[in-house]
Amino acid sequence: MATPPKKPKTSYVCSECGASQPKWAGQCPDCGAWNSLNEQLAPARPAAARGGGYAGLAGGAVIETLAEVAPEERARTACGIGELDRVLGGGLVGGSVILLGGDPGIGKSTLLLQACAALASSRRVLYVSGEESPQQISLRARRLGLDGEDIRLLPETCVERILYHAAAEQPRVMVVDSIQTLFTEQLQSAPGSVSQVRESAAQLVRFAKQRDTVVFLVGHVTKEGALAGPRVLEHMVDTVLYFEGESGGAFRLVRSIKNRFGAVNELGVFLMGDQGLREVKNPSAIFLSRHDEPTPGSLVMVTREGTRPLLVEVQALVDESSLANPRRVALGLDQNRLSMLLAVLHRHGGIGMFNQDVFVNVVGGVRIGETAADLPVLMAVLSSYRDRPLPLELAVFGEVGLSGEVRPVPNGPDRLREAVKHGLRRVIAPAGNVPKGGVEGLEIVAVRTLSEALDAL
Ligand code: TYD
Ligand code: MG
């Protein structure tokens, strides 16, 4: 009679105190934390512990001087979708692992299928799907107008079997859709659990490095906005990309949160149509869907996402509040920052809004994380409060400090040039950002303090 294969040893480790238990329990017997035990592979006995000290460990990596290490410029492969290449830092790097996260239905599978199709003509591509059947993928490919001639498909969820097939197929690019559906035979917990996701990803990362294969991992985002299961995934991979924007709207923004091979916060802009995602080469033109008439509370700001300046419209609505605690709502911006700015406006501009609800929105679903939005937000708020429209050809950027000073932001000249490029005539900018000779075709109002900026209106 054949003996069944030996089960790998696992133990349950508490994520709070690190104690290891042989069996799962709802509460850690050591520290008393609830629901903190996660299954883990029991570590192999370290060689040093088997006796003979460290002598048995000879023959691993050697130590060298940093100066002796020849820097290796990794070749990049353009994946054929310009905006995706942009967020990746200029193309795919061999052996890198890229995590693509986002809400369900936002377009992760669509984007990767399109990228696969673009890549497949020149290199071997394997699309592993644990979520959809080959028929469903074929339907989508038809909808996207792809012939799928060179895309190899594997419906599988067991990591060991995926790696077995991949080792035989030797793809240069492998897509795993999604990491939450995978399981490894070495653990007993359910697919999607922290331990399963971590261990499956670890095996795929090892494979990518050993075989110099690019691996895309699709990851779902939970309601709280974190990647379902563990944030640990973000540490294990080379690049983390997130889909932003509402899945209701037409725009899809892909942002790099972490990139070992390029700039972070780089933003790729796509339009979801009936033939999949289309690149938007000139996003400023789209986010600037302006009105014909100047309207109160609307203003163009010059922001910078990654390495590209971007013009976006901010809108503010200020309305008398009936609440004891008036509302401060910021969409696409940090709410605390808005409260802070309103305090600065009161203290240094003499304009109080304690009996007003303040709503601020960044048009197009872009999330602005940088401080250059401070001054434009305040001006939009003021414009709505006073019910006085701002000129259409005005753009603003600048950080506002707690003492009412307007501070320069990185890459001022770039932003000014972007404003001219899109036909804006006047810019209110921090004095420190204005180049000596000015910018041709642009009237620049350089300001040092908030009150100077308010006077400039
Ligand atoms: P999908 O890539 O399946 O999302 P995810 O993998 O992130 O869950 O995208 C699905 C959504 O995109 C779905 O709501 C339909 C829409 N869609 C289009 O609008 N046009 C298209 O050409 C395709 C393929 C999908
Ligand atoms: Mg999908």
Image: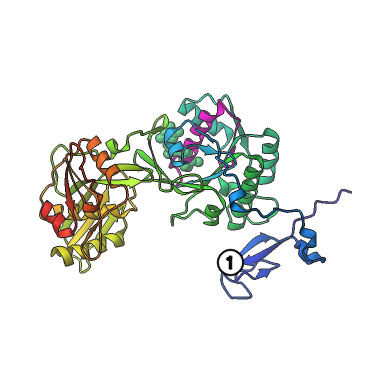
Query: How was this image coloured?
Result: rainbow
Could you tell me which residue is drawn at 55 percent across and 36 percent down?
75
Could you tell me which residue is drawn at 38 percent across and 45 percent down?
306
Residue 354 visible to the viewer? no
Question: Which residue does the numbered mark 1 point to in the structure image?
Answer: 15
The type of residue carrying mark 1 is: Ser
Q: Is residue 417 left or right of residue 280?
A: left
Total number of numbered discs in the rendering: 1
Residue placed most toward the observer, 124 or 364: 124
Q: In this view, does 224 lie to the left or right of 158?
A: left
Residue 262 is situated, as x and y percent measured from the top left of the image, at 47, 44
Residue 427 is situated, as x and y percent measured from the top left of the image, at 19, 45
- Position of residue 277 relative to residue 226, above or below, is above
State yes or no: Cβ of the residue under disc 1 lies below 8 Å from any atom of ligand 1.
no
Q: In this view, does 104 lie to the left or right of 23?
A: left
Residue furthest right as drawn: 1
Residue placed most toward the observer, 426 or 282: 426
Q: What element carries label 1?
A: loop
Could you tell me which residue is drawn at 81 percent across and 65 percent down?
50
Question: What segment is highlighted magenta in the picture?
Answer: 103-131
- Position of residue 397 relative to residue 119, above or below, is below
Residue placed most toward the observer, 241 or 51: 51
Residue 303 visible to the viewer? yes
Residue 237 is situated, as x and y percent measured from the top left of the image, at 55, 49
Could you tell me which residue is drawn at 66 percent across and 60 percent down?
40
Q: How crowded is mark 1: few (under 14 residues within 10 Å), some or many (20 or more)?
A: some
- Position of residue 19 relative to residue 427, above or below, is below
> Within the magenta stretch, is there residue 171?
no
> Within the magenta stretch, is there residue 105?
yes
Residue 214 is situated, as x and y percent measured from the top left of the image, at 58, 39
Residue placed most toward the observer, 109 or 323: 109
